Image (cartoon, grey):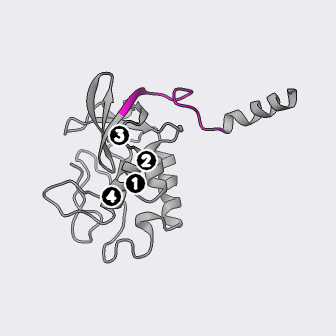
Amino acid sequence: MFLLIALLLVLAPTAAPALGEGIRGEPGTVLRVVDGDTVDVQLGGRRERLRLIGLNTPETVDPRRPVECFGREASAKAKALLPAGTVVHVEQDPQQGHRDRYGRLLAYLILPDGRNFAEVMIADGYGFEYTYRLPYRYRDRFRAAQDRARTRQRGLWAPGACAGWRTEAPRARRADPPARGALRSAERRSDP
């Protein structure tokens, strides 16, 4: 019995934390995935639209633009990871402000298994690491995840995934939201 308890104590720090154990942020419930980097969440009795910090995915819902390469796949992956009713933790970052210019709450989503949703999306090749103005809490981890996805040719980094489209991470700007169309060779990327 002592050996079993000792083994559990040794292995416990490596296991993913259960929701609420060592996870920062306020609990919330996913209502709807808007697209790969925007999610509606029930948070403290109110409905909030969240723009995920550090993640930028190809556009699917901007009525002024065509659906971008790998946008549908990114949205589908987000919906698979965040089905309606999923309880998550919403973590804000004081370095990033409270809301974006569209009124969306800026936050990270922590999945029930303790993983950061944005990091998972980037690591699997469904989005890009994106820094807006200032570094954010998980930037180094997200950049490392993007480097691994690119090296392993995962998702939008896979050969032929965006046939004829240049695949590159959007460039950060100091005072503006992401530029329009970074995935297209002739346009710059948007983030409405």
Mark 4 and mark 3: Cα distance apart in space: 29 Å
In the structure shown, which secondary structural element does the residue marked by tag 1 occupy?
A: helix
In the structure shown, which secondary structural element does the residue marked by tag 2 occupy?
A: helix
Q: What secondary structure do most residues of the magenta stretch adopt?
A: loop
Label 4 vs label 1, nearer the camera = 1
Position of 50 relative to 27 (above/below): below
Q: Label 1 amino acid?
A: Lys
Q: Label 4 amino acid?
A: Pro
Bin the neighbour count of mark 3 within 10 Å (Cα to Cα): few under 14, some 14-19, many 20 and up.
Answer: some
Badge 2 vs badge 1, beta-carbon distance below 8 Å:
yes
Badge 4 vs badge 2, beta-carbon distance below 8 Å:
no
Bin the neighbour count of mark 1 within 10 Å (Cα to Cα): few under 14, some 14-19, many 20 and up.
Answer: some
Question: Residue drawn at (19%, 39%), measured in percent from left and top?
Answer: 102
In the structure shown, which secondary structural element does the residue marked by tag 3 occupy?
A: loop
Displayed quadrant of residue 57:
bottom left
Q: Which contiguous range is marked in magenta? A: 15-29
In the structure shown, which secondary structural element does the residue marked by tag 4 occupy?
A: loop
Position of 137 relative to 74 (above/below): above
